[in-house]
Image (tube, rainbow, N blue to C red):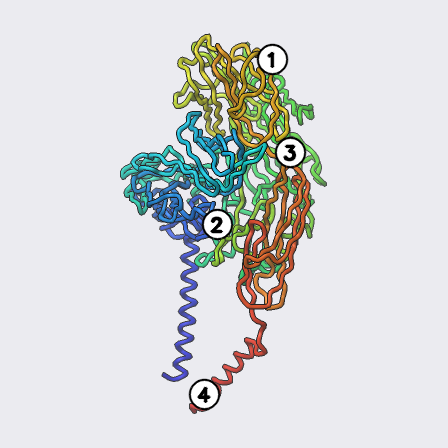
Amino acid sequence: MGIKNYIKMLCLLIVLGLLCETAAAQVSSSEGNRIWDENSNQNFTYTWTPQTYSGFYYDLDTGVGSENMTIQLTEGSRSVQRNELQYETRPIKTEFEFGDWDSYQVIGFMAEKYFAGYTENSSFVKDDISVISEGQLSKILTDSDDRKSLYTGSSLILEEGYSLNIVEVDINGDTVWVQLEKDGDVVDEDFLSSNSDYVYETKLGAAEDVPLIAVHLAQIFSGRETNAVFVEGIFQISDEYVQIENGDRFGKMEISSTSSSGITMKNRDSITLSKGDTIDIMGKLSFVVADANELRFAPIVETSEPGTYELRGTVYDEVFKTTVWTPFNFEGFYYSIDENVSTESLTLKEGISGRSINDEALVYSTSPALVKFEHDGWGSYEVIGFMAEKYFAGYPANTFGNSKSVSVLSDNILAKVLIDDDNKKSMSTGSSIVLENGYSLKASEVDINGKSVLFELYKDGKLLDSGIVSQNGDYIYEADIGGAEEVPMIAVHLSTVFRSRETDAVFIEGVFQISDDYSELSQGESFDRMEISTISSSGITMRNEDSISLSKGNTIDLMGNVKFKVADSSVLRFYPFVEVESAAQDQLEIEAPDVLVVGQAAEIQVMARNVSVSDVEIFLEDERIGTTGDDGTLTYTPNQEGKFTLSANKAGYISGSKDVDVVGAGVLKLLLSISPETVRIGDQINIVVTDSVEKKPVSGADVFFGGLKVEGQTGTDGTVSYWVTAPGTYTVNATKAGYEEGETVIEVSEDRANFEYSDFSIEPASVKGGDAVTIQVKVENTGNIAGETEVELLVNNESVDSKAVSLEAGASTVVDFSHTEEEAGTYNVEVGDMSGSYEVTKSTPFLSGIATLGILATAFILLRKRRN
């Protein structure tokens, strides 16, 4: 074959490679977004994967996910026919947080993480144990390698009513006697030595001898005054498993196959994606559909339960080389699905060099956009997403009767949008609705004709403003924000006024509030790694001032709540994410006596943000016992003795619960209270014992702290004192003849400095031999007293440098190291529990890459001349 033919073939291969790359990019884009939009030219057969949807379980370190969901849509139709929504999940191997235990099997199921089995590599089991092969799944409750210190008489509190009690340490400090309790009853005990595992096995459905709890005892200490046990590894799965088999239905989905290799589900009936609907698909997974003529929808996971949730963007990896994140592929950014309004984007303007994002190569931009108020009668306002949070930017003209437009962004000011809803709320005369930032609005009085209401606005309990509002009118509170004057900060729509001889009622339907704690921005201002390069009424642009090292296993604070999480892997893999917490203001709180008496009526009240909540369903265990009235109360008369859990549920609120004891008529139970509320080592605590009926002090009661009797008995005031000498979780009991025993649990915290490491970076990620890298880490004292620590730098497991750090409680600092290596190779770097690596290359030879190409070109010309 001639050289010309070689060249032609090479060119053809290059073109084919480019075409393949383009095709791969098209495939990726067809599955790279969370939101499906008929106007975005997306495939009608569409798949959500763990790499593209943050609701599905994904192990970033291994790059492996468990769940996939594929939908088959029909052009011009909003119906999903039977079996055209398919969900698949399979068990995958993941490592325990405590590394010595190796690995186990996990499976995502309906967007929640479940335990599937132990593998031959799981160090505390003898054989493979697969619960999924028995059609069972159990939630993973704890997987931690946090170090904890326990003392004789204290307990390690686990989930679902379990606790591991440290009974006694032998005199030589070689072994410890532990007991495992479930709801106060001992279910297991063992004698263990240092560097050993406590494992509790039980039958889980059809699976025999399943380790339910594993605790690694790293060290046992026996001193003259104190015995201690140090725990460094906890794993627990739920004993309340989910049973699955073919034909089982979960929401709209039905299991079509299940085995040890995975689960498949399909929709049994057709699903209609109606405008504005939220459709329960299965478990906590739903479809939210835009209230728009065009079809636009996305999967969402319910996050109403208390906790912290991670919202991540599409992964950057070998397949999805994602360079742009918007609300379509990053759920953390602000987005209005009804109006298809998005404002934020994060863009990699150039390729990643090794593991580094070059200076100013990462660009964040956001711009204001008009969105409708939730209350239709108010029109629109300007909103802007900023660092994954929703902010107010201004009002157009004729909003709330103001003929002029308002732009706070033009004054470089942003104010968070705190409330924007159209929920109907009822108020009686004298009651208040609780707003954000310490504000509350009181319906002070209804006029005699029942046509208007006197509203009073309070801030931190002090009267701030008042106004008379007629039916179908608006209460507006205005204030100055920076250079913008008389900006409407609070708006409440009064829909109906009702007046009768006995009751006055006010109904509101629309609340809007922006924060008075606004942010003033300026060009050049930095937020973590990003710096504002431009700001105006048209938007904000930010760039990374310095290079960003994507070191293995690192979490990088990018800006505000937005972070990058990098895989602990030799393969570069990362994603942006934000962490959100469920709204604490929507938490239902139950106020009821700790002890109820059979046959005696008791009042149960439900509150949220200090306001009574009506129409709340109350359950005693699984039995529905009633619904709260307009005053938020329910009167209940128990009919059986025992320990029970009251729970309160209402749509739009986080469920609340409270444990109560029900005793027989005439039975007196001892109640305990302990002060101070926060107990530390060395504190003298007062334990007060009262009776359950009249709440009077009980004298002559014996009190036990962690199983040891407290010296003396309670006095006439029902009090006995005790000096706390060791940290831990302790059960405190009280007994007296003629009374039912009472108990409570307290946590004794340790006065100590605790140092945690974060924001680890190595710059640059690749250097020539003899050139220095800068290693940086943030050190924070998360303890409750000042302390010192030695920050040690390890390179390839050898200590090469260290720096002493002294910090007050709650303080932090950044520690820098400079390090140089001569030899080419990969160098692993560790500081505390943070780690990463960088490359050292040989010094460049005198022949550069361009020179080499020149020589090859010359050789090519000579070859041509020779052939001619």
> Which of marks 3 and 2 precedes in the sequence?
2
The alpha-carbon separation of the residues under discs 3 and 4 comes to 79 Å
**Residue holding disc 2:** 329
> Which of marks 4 and 3 precedes in the sequence?
3
**Residue holding disc 3:** 489
The alpha-carbon separation of the residues under discs 3 and 1 comes to 56 Å
Q: Nearer the viewer, mark 3 or mark 1?
A: 1
- Residue 295 is situated, as x and y percent measured from the top left of the image, at 42, 44
> Which of marks 1 and 2 precedes in the sequence?
2
Residue at the spot 61% in from the left edge and 16% down from the top edge: 447
The alpha-carbon separation of the residues under discs 2 and 3 comes to 32 Å
Amino acid type of the residue tagged 3 in the rendering: Met
Label 1 packing within 10 angstroms: few (<14), some (14-19), many (20+): some
Please indicate, yes or no, whether residue 840 appears anywhere in the rendered image: yes
**Residue holding disc 1:** 715
Q: Secondary structure at mark 4?
A: helix
> Which of marks 4 and 1 precedes in the sequence?
1
The alpha-carbon separation of the residues under discs 2 and 4 comes to 52 Å
Amino acid type of the residue tagged 1 in the rendering: Gly
- Residue 294 is situated, as x and y percent measured from the top left of the image, at 43, 45
Q: Nearer the viewer, mark 1 or mark 4?
A: 1
The alpha-carbon separation of the residues under discs 2 and 1 comes to 65 Å
The alpha-carbon separation of the residues under discs 1 and 4 comes to 110 Å
> Which of marks 4 and 2 precedes in the sequence?
2
- Residue 146 is situated, as x and y percent measured from the top left of the image, at 52, 41
| 349 relative to 758, above or below | below
- Residue 187 is situated, as x and y percent measured from the top left of the image, at 39, 29
Q: Secondary structure at mark 3?
A: strand
Q: Tell me whether the residue at label 3 lies in contact with that at label 1, contact meaning CB atoms closer than 8 angstroms.
A: no
**Residue holding disc 4:** 864
